[in-house]
Image (tube, grey):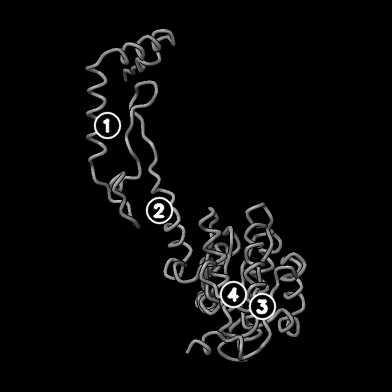
């Protein structure tokens, strides 16, 4: 079979330079390139999430570079598109706008402390640390709000986050009882993601499920403990509550939460139930 060598490989660098200079000096060539650039920029793409009038939803804009060549420049809208894509993959897209650090209610001293810890935690993760954030205690106190806001901010800063409700984890794992391959794949996703966010951690439907849930929780968190993967957890159980049932599990959480720095406990107090106070 006859093969052909690309012409570009047969031309010396000196000749290439002369061709480039000649293109710049020929008005017709510039005019032709300009028409190509304008024609591409008028096309409409089908990228999702937002409508961008600049690139017309293609993600790229055609330009003529300093060498007089046609080139592609990424549109500024791609940063936002990546954010929404990562939110969609994480499972947080529906709540990202509602639960943000900017609209977390911090009128009380205990709320201000939680917000400060949340911001410090984000900075630690972005500086390369692999700490865990644990927020446990009083229901309705904004635990899910702050953990969702932290996870959303990490996504906006380029981290990959996987969000799961604990009952979803437990139910899905139990449903794969006789399918070992699917169980391994399911657990691998929980083990390996950049950041795992578990909401309503260890919320069980019945006391009979407690041992099963604690065993599964230890299996998942121990894997992330060993691989030093950042993990965000909200729960109605404080770390002290966990210690009564499984000191090994609570001990790992405290250690990974920078020796308790990011293990936050909100005392049981009806005055801290913001949902009741709002209603």
Residue 16 at x, y percent in the picture: 39, 12
Estimate the spatial distance between the alpha carbons at disc 3 and disc 2, rounded to whole Å. Answer: 35 Å
- Quick one: label 1 or label 2, which is nearer the N terminus? 1
Q: Is 231 drawn above or below residue 241 in the view shown?
A: above
**Label disc, if present, on residue 205 of the rendered structure:** none
Residue 230 lies in quadrant: bottom right
- Quick one: label 4 or label 2, which is nearer the N terminus? 2
Estimate the spatial distance between the alpha carbons at disc 4 and disc 2, rounded to whole Å. Answer: 30 Å
Q: Residue furthest front?
A: 107
Instruction: Verify CB contact (< 8 Å) between mark 1 and mark 2.
Output: no
Estimate the spatial distance between the alpha carbons at disc 1 and disc 3, rounded to whole Å. Answer: 57 Å
Estimate the spatial distance between the alpha carbons at disc 3 and disc 4, rounded to whole Å. Answer: 8 Å
Estimate the spatial distance between the alpha carbons at disc 1 and disc 2, rounded to whole Å. Answer: 23 Å
- At mark 3, the secondary structure is helix
Specify the quadrant that holds the N terminus: top left
- The residue tagged 3 is 110
- At mark 4, the secondary structure is loop
- The residue tagged 4 is 106
Estimate the spatial distance between the alpha carbons at disc 1 and disc 4, rounded to whole Å. Answer: 51 Å
- Quick one: label 1 or label 3, which is nearer the N terminus? 1
- The residue tagged 2 is 81
Front residue of 138 and 228: 138
- Quick one: label 1 or label 4, which is nearer the N terminus? 1
Front residue of 180 and 12: 12
- Quick one: label 3 or label 2, which is nearer the N terminus? 2
């Amino acid at each position: 079979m006859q093969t052909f060598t690309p012409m570009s490989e047969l031309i010396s660098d000196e000749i290439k330079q002369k061709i480039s200079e000649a293109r710049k000096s020929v008005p017709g060539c510039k005019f032709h390139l300009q028409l190509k650039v304008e024609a591409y920029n008028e096309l409409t793409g089908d990228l999702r999430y937002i409508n961008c009038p600049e690139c017309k939803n293609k993600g790229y804009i055609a330009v003529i570079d300093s060498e007089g060549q046609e080139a592609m420049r990424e549109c500024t809208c791609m940063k936002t598109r990546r954010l929404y894509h990562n939110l969609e993959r994480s499972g947080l897209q529906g709540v990202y706008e509602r639960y943000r650090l900017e609209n977390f209610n911090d009128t009380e001293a205990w709320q201000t402390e939680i917000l400060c810890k949340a911001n410090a935690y984000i900075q630690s993760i972005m500086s390369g640390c692999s700490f865990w954030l644990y927020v446990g205690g009083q229901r309705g106190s904004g635990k899910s709000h702050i953990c969702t806001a932290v996870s959303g901010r990490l996504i906006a800063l380029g981290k990959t986050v996987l969000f799961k409700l604990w009952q979803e984890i437990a139910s899905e794992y139990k449903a794969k009882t006789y399918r070992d391959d699917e169980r391994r794949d399911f657990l691998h996703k929980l083990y390996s993601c950049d950041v795992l966010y578990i909401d309503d951690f260890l919320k069980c439907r019945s006391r009979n499920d407690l041992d099963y849930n604690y065993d599964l929780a230890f299996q998942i968190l121990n894997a992330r403990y060993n691989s030093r993967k950042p993990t965000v957890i909200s729960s109605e159980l404080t770390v002290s509550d966990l210690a009564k049932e499984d000191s090994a599990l609570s001990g790992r959480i405290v250690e990974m939460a920078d020796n308790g720095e990011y293990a936050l406990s909100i005392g049981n107090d009806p005055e801290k139930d913001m949902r009741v106070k709002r209603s």
